[in-house]
């Protein structure tokens, strides 16, 4: 025992170094284990399909999970929009999503793109689609290969048409069969017996208000109409 004590005293700096190194190594191993992602919570509408790619971020260091990881999940789940991502240290990530709702098919050169109500591409097909959703005819040529599933069609006329599509369905309770985007100032929505004209040059809110007020008055009066055009200062109606 004296010889051991003598050795420890004589080599105290070496002993302290070994002890400190062992302590740091233990701490590093413990930290490595604690700060790796163990729980991924997904909040939102996932009734039809689970969110793909979530397992890929399990086991990663929580501080290294960033936009690249989230973008990879976006690409795997075009029918979902990732609203926000929250990190709860030491090991939990919460992903808040909502479901993209199909709106209409966009006719492009060589096929069709199924767009959500937010203009996100949910599907690409070369086959003529069923009549489940309206078909949009667009005055500009878009090659089939230009866009991929999950991308957004960034065109005001298309985004506005999808907005007015939802508005017409909600306000009139009628089914829109087709949409014809003739120009920036002429968006035509067609039901079986009515036509609605909108414009991307005029504020959405004003066109919405004019449409709602006109339809409300027609219901009160029992007036039948065939065309309602809200592109101008005052609505134009044909009976």
Image (tube, rainbow, N blue to C red):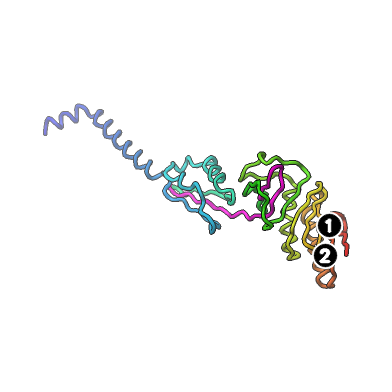
Question: Dividing the picture into quarters, in which one does residue 131 lie?
Answer: bottom right
Tell me where the magenta segment starts and ends, as one range: 90-114
Q: Position of residue 156 (x, y in %)?
A: 74, 47
Q: Quadrant of the C terminus?
A: bottom right
The residue that label 2 is drawn on is: 214
Place residue 133 in its image quadrant: bottom right
The outermost residue toward the front is: 127
Q: Residue at x 59, y 55 (%)?
A: 99
Identified at 83% across, 72% down, the residue is 222
Crowd tier of the residue under label 2, counting other residues whose Cα lies within 10 Å: few below 14, some 14–19, many 20 or above: some
**51 above or below 235?**
above
Image height check: is 201 above or below 193? above
Q: Is residue 164 left or right of residue 217?
A: left
User: Disc 1 designates what residue?
Assistant: 230
Image quadrant containing the N terminus = top left
Q: 109 or 5, which lies in front?
A: 109
Horizontal side of residue 54 vs 192, given as left or right: left
């Amino acid at each position: 025992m004296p010889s051991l004590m003598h050795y420890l005293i004589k080599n105290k700096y070496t002993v302290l170094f070994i002890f400190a190194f062992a302590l740091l190594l233990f701490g590093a191993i413990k930290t490595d284990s604690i700060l790796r992602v163990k729980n991924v919570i997904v909040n939102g509408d996932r009734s039809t399909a689970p969110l793909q790619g979530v397992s890929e971020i399990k086991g990663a260091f929580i501080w290294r999970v960033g936009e690249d990881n989230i973008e990879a999940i976006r690409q795997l789940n075009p029918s979902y929009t990732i609203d926000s991502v929250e990190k709860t240290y030491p090991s939990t990530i919460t992903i808040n999503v909502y479901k993209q709702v199909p709106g209409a098919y966009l006719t492009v050169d060589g096929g069709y793109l199924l767009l959500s109500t937010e203009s996100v591409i949910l599907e690409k097909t070369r086959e003529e689609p069923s009549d489940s959703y309206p078909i949009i005819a667009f005055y500009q040529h878009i090659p089939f290969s230009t866009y991929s599933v999950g991308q957004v069609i960034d065109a005001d006329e298309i985004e506005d048409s999808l907005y007015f599509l939802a508005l017409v369905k909600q306000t009139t309770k009628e089914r829109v069969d087709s949409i014809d985007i003739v120009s920036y100032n002429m968006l035509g929505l067609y039901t079986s017996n009515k036509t609605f004209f909108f414009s991307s040059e005029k504020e959405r809110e004003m066109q919405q208000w004019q449409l709602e007020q006109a339809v409300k008055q027609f219901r009160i009066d029992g007036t039948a109409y065939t065309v309602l055009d809200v592109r101008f200062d005052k609505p134009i109606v044909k009976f």
